[in-house]
Image (cartoon, rainbow, N blue to C red):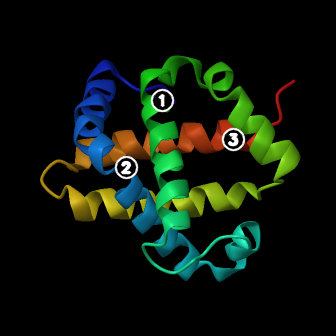
Amino acid sequence: MSLSDSEKSGLEALWVKIAPEADNIGGEAMNSFLTSHPEAKTHFSHFDLTPKSADLLKHGGKIMNALGDAIKNVDNLPTSMASLTELHVDKLKVEPGNFKLLSEAIETALAARFPEDFTDANKAAWGKLLEKVSAVLSTKAA
């Protein structure tokens, strides 16, 4: 499931708008994810999980900025995300299903923030990107 050149362009164009708000958008997505799936809070027991907390904003920003890096390296995700994969698979042992659930929260946050830019085509491209990233973060490197 590769991304077409037009899908890549759409991701890059929207990323320009997302980047300045990465912490806030990521924090909103994290809050939504943890509210909807409280069982995932076990991975964040050391965080202040109140909405808009510094912990949620910081971690949400890390997630969004990792996605920005993924957009730049979409054709080489296993290599570009190797350290994140090792962290999530080996150290944190994150359940793969959590990536899908967080992806849904990210898409919802993007749609709410950028309703005119989050067209059906852009939504499809983000869906592909998030699916690719989730697969990489869920698979132990050989």
Q: Disc 3 to disc 1, how far (Cα)?
A: 14 Å
**Nearest to viewer (mark 3 / mark 1):** 1
Residue at 67 percent across and 24 percent down: it is 78
Residue 51 drawn above or below residue 132: below
**Nearest to viewer (mark 3 / mark 2):** 2
Element on which disc 3 rests? helix
Residue at 34 percent across and 63 percent down: it is 109
Kind of residue at disc 3:
Leu
Q: Which residue in the protein does label 3 denote?
A: 137
Q: Which residue in the protein does label 2 denote?
A: 22
Residue at 57 percent across and 75 percent down: it is 34
Element on which disc 1 rests? helix
Specify whether 132 is left or right of 16: right
**Nearest to viewer (mark 1 / mark 2):** 2
Residue 121 drawn above or below residue 4: below
Kind of residue at disc 2:
Ala
Residue at 64 percent across and 29 percent down: it is 81
Which tag, 3 or 2, sits closer to the chain's start? Answer: 2
Q: Which residue in the protein does label 1 denote?
A: 69
